[in-house]
Image: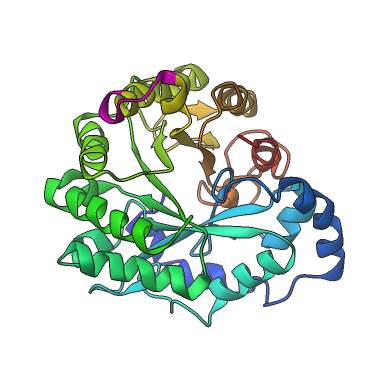
Amino acid sequence: MPLSKPTHRRLALAAAIGLLGAGATTAATAQAAPESAHTAAAPSGLNGPYLYLGWGSPPKATDVMSATGTQQFTMAFMLSDGGCNPKWDGSRALTGGNDQSTINSIRSAGGDVTVSFGGWSGNKLGEKCSSASALAGAYQKVIDAYKLKSIDIDIESTEFENATVRQRVIDALKTVKQKNSGIKVYVTFGTTTTGPDSNGKDLVKRGAAAGLDVDGWTVMPFDFGQGSIDMAAATKSAVDGLKNTVASAYGLSSDAAYRKAGFSSMNGKTDVAGETISLNNFKSMVSYAKSHHLARVSFWSLNRDRKCGSGTDGDACSGIDQGTYDFTKALAGYNG
């Protein structure tokens, strides 16, 4: 996701201090339980907003569950430690730290997580692992550590722009699919207003050529750099273009291709001047997703799902007038 930039990563440890411990409160568990029963059948990764523990004054996950009914979170980001070894944000231990205690608390309250690999900045495993088998091994290490039911490959920047790396990621994911029965694999990347660019189209085509069954090809429809435009319309157009790419590459009908497509939006003001995704925009996007039964809907990020106040910035708030967790509440209602 674009906001994960090096200038923000220096805040990682400081911003994470004070987050929740290993257990969820009894009250949070009790309040979350009814919704948990309702959404238990939802595919893993279907509707988890991104939660980033590195900066942005992350909210307490179990409080969010109690307030919104959400049961899924996309935990960001798993990166390289400089070699072919996964660490949270490239620096925090894979297990035993705050990231694990947060995941444990989510699960104790009846929820679950999708781990996202990549993001805009930092060392990417797809580049640092020298072969598809080594990359698959790095993915597997995380899957095993957390007994994951789903993973998200947020492929951006140089990892996305290099054809050799794109192929390495595809081949590694095919191994992951073969070794982990039933695991959901989502691949997330940038887009134009009309669908994937040449790199995105190539990535999907490589997936189809390899016989990789991606559960959801997911575009990020924002940061278009076109100023003030209708972001709901642009999102729908981008996903329609993605659907066409997936349908063509895999030989699917439009309906089947929509069910293999999705989007990860942003909430409020984005990274480019004049571009804003309102709550009404987002609700319209979710309605569109329901009409086409999209495989995944998410947004960047839960950290920003509140209005700004004194001492906060774009990493910790949306920049628009909204209620706390309004976007998460809208997303929690998406069931495919």
Front in this rendered view, residue 296 or 5: 296
Place of residue 209 in the rendered image (x, y in percent of width and height, measured from the top left): 20, 39
Q: Residue furthest bottom?
A: 96
Instruction: Work out whether residue 321 can be spotted.
Output: yes
Residue 237 position in % (x across, y down): 41, 18
Residue drawn at the location 23% of the way across and 74% of the way down:
83
Residue 267 shown left or right of residue 7 in the figure: right
In the image, residue 244 lies at what x, y percent?
A: 34, 21
| Residue found at x 38% / y 33% | 223
* Region of the chain picked out in magenta, as a range: 248-254
| Left or right of 200, for residue 3 | right
Q: Which quadrant, please, contains the C terminus?
A: top right
Tell me where residue 217 sits by quadrant: top left
Q: Position of residue 251 (x, y in %)?
A: 30, 25
- Above or below, 95 against 331 in this view is below
Q: Is residue 203 magenta?
A: no
Residue at 37%, 49% in the rendered image: 154
Q: Residue furthest left?
A: 164
Res. 1 in view: no
Q: Quadrant of residue 285?
A: top right
Q: How many marks?
A: 0
Using residue 327 as the reference point, say whether residue 141 is left or right of it.
left
Q: How is the image coloured?
A: rainbow
Nearest to the observer: residue 242 or residue 271: 242
| Residue 46 vertical placement versus 280 (above, below) | below
